[in-house]
Amino acid sequence: MFEHLQEQLRTLSKTTEISVPLEADAEGFLDKECPSETCLFQFKIAEEDWKNIVRDEEVFCPSCGHTAPAQSWFTKEQIDAAKEYALDQITNGINAAMRADAEASKRRAKRNSFISITLEAKGGRDAVLLPVAAAHPMRLKTSCEECECRYSYVGAAYFCPSCGKNSASHTFLQTLETIRTAAGLGSKLRETLGRDEAEVIAQTLLEKAMQDTVMSFQRVSEQLYEHRTGRVAKRNAFQRLGTGSELWEAELGVTYTDILDEEALTQLTIYFQQRHLLAHQQGIVDADYLTRSQDTQYEIGQRLVIRQAEVLRFATLIEKLAKSIMEYCDTK
Ligand SMILES: [Zn+2]
Ligand SMILES: [Zn+2]
């Protein structure tokens, strides 16, 4: 009487693997996530290139440069969906079939309506969910000059996932463009989301843009410096304006004061200190900040409020500074 069920259970007891279909997005890109616990950076890679160019043994995180074999780059969402899918497969084996596909496609639709953006925060990273409509313009699509692998990401990232080439100069200016786009998303968010939620996310994006600006400047400076001198600059040296300027003075005979006027440099100092506060003090103004930045707008204990105009000004100043250094590196 239970022959079918018994047969089904016998088959199940032998099952050690269930294949889960993973679908590329409408543009043929697969979601990937850095397996390093401190990073978890999410990016996309062209499905074709994932199959044909990327090697099984080694994939590089575009953000932190962490390497791991190709099977370690599933996103948390994919793993959760896969577990659910596998469970459905087993349940269906016992009950009726066919349900899993419908369920899975429903889940995929749900997953695709939001995208998760990872943000650096004290003691780890936070993720915010952004509506696809808002996140889409922020996504930077690029391909490696070396191996032609196509990949895309939101924010600041520099390593080719396939060959690991550090393409900081190549992506620096593009990255600034996405930072500018992100800074201007407030009104788009207000169209899609409730007012309060839109404000919170817009503020988060502006803060992320401040951090990405420093990070992209740091990476491009490190690469220029290494290319020029054959030496690796001390960790985070280019996160500090004074230290960075001294390094270039020793190498090129040029300081940041030669490139930017006093007002611009004062402003840049404030932005760099704000980045530091956002990354390490959750944006709460402390005495160190006031001393280092000479910012007269805030008092101790206040929280920074980052405005769109400031992010745009920051991007303009950093672009000017980096472009000048690039030129000096070429001509001196
Ligand atoms: Zn990473
Ligand atoms: Zn490459």
Image (cartoon, grey):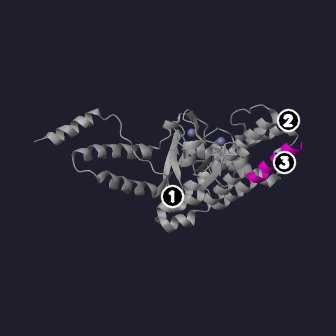
Residue 319 is one of the magenta-drawn residues? yes
In front of the other: label 3 or label 2?
3
Mark 1–mark 2 CB contact (< 8 Å): no
Q: Which residue is mark 2?
A: 250
Q: Residues within 10 Å of mark 3 (few under 14, many from 20)?
A: few
Residue 294 shows up from this direction: no
Mark found first going from the N terminus, 1 or 2:
1
Secondary structure beneath label 3? helix
Residue at disc 1, CB closer than 8 Å to ligand 2: no
**Separation of disc 3 and disc 2 at Cα?**
16 Å
Which stretch did the figure color magenta?
Answer: 318-332
Determine the residue positioned at 35% across, 40% down: 18
Query: Which residue extends farthest bottom?
Result: 191
Between the residue at mark 1 and the residue at mark 3, the CA separation in whole angstroms equals 40 Å
> Dot 1: within a 10 Å radius of its alpha carbon, few (fewer than 14), some, or many (20 or more) residues?
few
Left or right of 76, for residue 246:
right
Whether tag 1 and tag 3 are in contact, CB under 8 A, the answer is no
Q: Which residue is mark 3?
A: 327
Query: What is the distance, in whole Å, between disc 1 and disc 2 at their CAs?
Result: 50 Å
Query: Few, some or many C-alpha atoms within 10 Å of disc 2 (few <14, some 14-19, many ≥20)?
Result: few
**Taking the image as four quarters, which one is ligand 1 found in?**
top right
Secondary structure, magenta segment, majority class? helix
Compared with 124, 299 (above or below) is below
Q: Which residue is mark 1?
A: 26
